[in-house]
Image (tube, grey):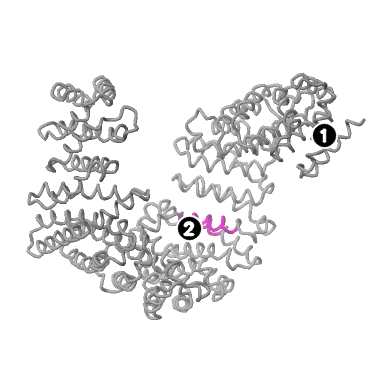
Amino acid sequence: MDIQSASSVVLQALTQATSQDTAVLKPAEEQLRQWETQPGFYSVLLSIFNNHLLDVNVRWLAVLYFKNGIDRYWRRVAPHALSEEEKSSLRAGLITNFNEPVNQIATQIAVLIAKVARLDCPRQWPELIPILLESVKVQDSLQQHRALLTFYHVTKTLASKRLATDRRLFQDLASSIYSFACSLWNHHTDTFLQQICTGDQQAALSSLERTLLSLKVLRKLTVHGFIEPHNNMEVMGFLNAVFERLKQFLECCRQFGPGSLCREKLEKTIILFTKVLLDFLEYHPWPFIPLIQRSLEFAVSYVFTEVGEGVVFERFIVQCMNLIKMIVKNEAYKPAKNIEDSKPENLEAHKIKTAFFTHQTLTEIGRRLVSKYFLLTEEELTMWEEDPESFAVEETGGDSWKYSLRPCTEVLFLDIFHNYSQTLTPVLLEMVQNLQGPSNVEDPVQMLMKDAVYNAVGLAAYELFDNVDFDQWFKNQLLGELQISHNRYKLIRRRVIWLIGQWISVKFKPELRPLLYEVILSLMQDPDLVVRIETATTLKLAVDDFEFRTEQFLPYLESIFSLLFQLLQQVNECDTKMQVLHVISCVIERVSIQIRPYAGCLVQYLPILWKQSEEHNMLRCAILTTLIHLIQGLGAESKNLYPFLLPVIQLSTDVSQPPHVYLLEDGLELWLVTLENSPAITPELLRIFQNMSALLELSSENVRTCFQIINAYIYLSATDFLQNYAEALCRSFCELLRDITTEGQVQVLKVVEIAIKVSPVLGSHMFQPLLPAVLRGIVEGERYPVVMSTYLGVTGRILLQNSGFFTSLLTQMAVEYNQEADQLLGSMIEMWVDRMDNITQPERRKLSALALSAFTI
């Protein structure tokens, strides 16, 4: 492809490919796809996206096509690979200048340069890094930024390579450029701080962007560029400097209000500083030991003292808490159980931690965590009032502890409490003691504090086992608080029922269960939706506990189940309905057949809910789980559900339907349970087996359940089933046996054995194509014992239950082996007797013994 003549046609095609008109768009995309493998195409793309006079959308598309081409055609071994000459020309063109004016395109160009660097740097592209290092020194602001942006993406990409040779190359690169990277970062950081002092915000914002990019480069070099970073003075110097820079940047936050562009960039840079420390701690726990003291002092002072007032923000608090948590939990910082087995580094780290976490420090951290960070915020209380379902789901589910303040706070509390329980237990118990008795509904501060303290006691339930008599507390204090019906007291009612749920499996006497069920019955009628949802969750924990006794629960079953059903109808959000359905499923599972008198309302509602949840596959999964337990509880009565149930199974197990991706596993389980509880086969139940052939072709992790379903059909109605499906099933089995594991082979043969056992004549005839291989395996001495045992089982069944068919099969095999039937039979019996020890199951040994004795009759 000649660049001069091709540029105009490629440019025209790219222009058409940006059109909103599909009649113009589709042919242009097809033309560009055809050109992808043409020599010179990527050189044309390079010239187009480097031409700043062209339309931005066209240039953007040219960059994307170039980037995709790197993935497909840059490697030497790729089909239609680019020539070395063109790649050399492209590499040179990519780094000729760094003056892209459009930010989004500049980022994409930096990414595609990094993609090429991943494949070619440094061997085929040794000049890349030196050119980047020179380019970040230029005075031109735009060129400097674009070069620094590219430098970051190249560093990030090279750091991500994991082969030993690639890691050594990156370590060599890090050693050679680390000093420069540090000086570059210091220069931009100092420039930013000076500009802040002089009030030049626009210039400061530009310098801050360069500070951020140079810090990103240093993060990758520091974390991934050194095998023994603690022996490198510059690395340790940079890490120590991070703390001072953090303090300077946090102070700068005072000058900018929340939401301002400069404040946003400042916070982003501050978070990046903390990521440097967290990454270094994760990848290099022992080299981090000299930084433990300073890290703890910094994080604790900003999060748990007045130092952070007015400057800290939520994401920074989360990062600091994660830093404390990782130090507290790190196994490298704990001595071995046998002190003599500890490494010096373990002992040194443990000594530093012990010296830092004094009684006073731990007490202050514990109090602040509970009294400050456990308190429900105004935003959360507003959500409770305006969107109670979202509040309830967020509280019970929560986000990852790494990114959200509340779960992060709770995880830190648990980790510190676990490691320093002797110190923190008296602190928490004192806080509980100070809040004894009902709270004043006119004092919201006291109410919020009690909620926070009870939250802490629930989280630390296992740690407090020996220190809290929960049964007495439940009877003497908590029970009374649950009976306070004032609207404002819903905060405490909800927390107390949650607290009980946390302690049920820890320390709760079985004889108190009826009292708990009465409380649950009462709170399931609470005016507040959040309280009702929380109560349902506690009910699930109660019935799921190993000390659950059905007879204790039965007097309350009808009322509670009715209220659960009402709650399921009242809630609107998909997540909340799923939550309530899981509770209902759990109750049905535990009470089993006792649910039959009360299931009618649920049976009528589930079809409606299934239709409403057409766009919510996860909710449909919850419905399937509920149906599984419901069918088990209803037993043979479940046949009344078939008009709804069978179409649900049909849809869930049809691999041609998109929802099967979500529903298949639960749908198969429901199918199996339905068969196991069916009193008789029906034409509709028989018809859904049409889905099975495609399911067997999947050969997925669900194939075992598929075999169980097949066996269930045979047991339920062998004649009807085999007459309708045995031929197709036999074909599927023949396909499966060509490429299947030993376990799968055994599963297939067990189906055949069961078919012959239940219907000897029909089973033998229908699966006849599979049987020669069985006799062949016996005669030739199958080497896998479990397979041989199954071969003998199948043959024993035929011999005992359909001897005429066995004789004809033996005659057929004798022809194949060119032997007399008696001679072949003798060889088979000899091998059978020799392999009897392969049969471990008593019933199979008995079967073989009976079959062998039949030869003597």
The C terminus sits in image quarter:
top right
- Give left or right: position of 453 versus 125: right
Q: What mark, if any, has residue 830 been given in the picture?
A: 1
Rendered position, 245 above or below 34: below
Q: Indicate the quadrant where residue 686 lies.
A: top right
* Residue 554 shows in the view: yes
**Does residue 75 appear left or right of residue 641 in this picture?**
left
Q: Position of residue 714 (x, y in %)?
A: 72, 31
Q: Is residue 536 one of those drawn in magenta?
A: yes
- Any part of residue 268 in sight: no
Residue 470 bears which disc, if any? none
Between marks 2 and 1, how big is the CA–CA gap?
A: 73 Å
Identify residue for label 2.
Answer: 531
Residue extending farthest right: 857
Amino acid on which disc 1 is placed: Glu
Looking at the image, tell me whether mark 2 or mark 1 is earlier in sequence order. 2
What count of labels does the image hold? 2
| Residue 572, percent from left and from top | 45, 45
Secondary element at tag 2: helix
Q: Nearer the viewer, residue 727 or 217?
A: 217
Query: Observer-nearest residue: 318 or 53?
Result: 53
Q: Quadrant of residue 17?
A: top left
- In this view, the mark in front (2 or 1): 1
Looking at the image, which residue is at 70% across and 57% down?
Answer: 551
Query: Is residue 546 shown in magenta?
Result: no
Residue 119 in the image: state x and y as whole percent: 29, 41
Check disc 1: other Cα within 10 Å, few if <14, some if 14-19, many if 20+. Answer: few
Magenta range is 521-542
- Mark 2 neighbour density, 10 Å: few (under 14) some (14–19) many (20 or more): many
Q: Name the image quarter holding residue 256.
A: bottom left
- Which residue occupies the foreground of this view, 485 or 121? 121
Q: Main secondary structure of the magenta part?
A: helix
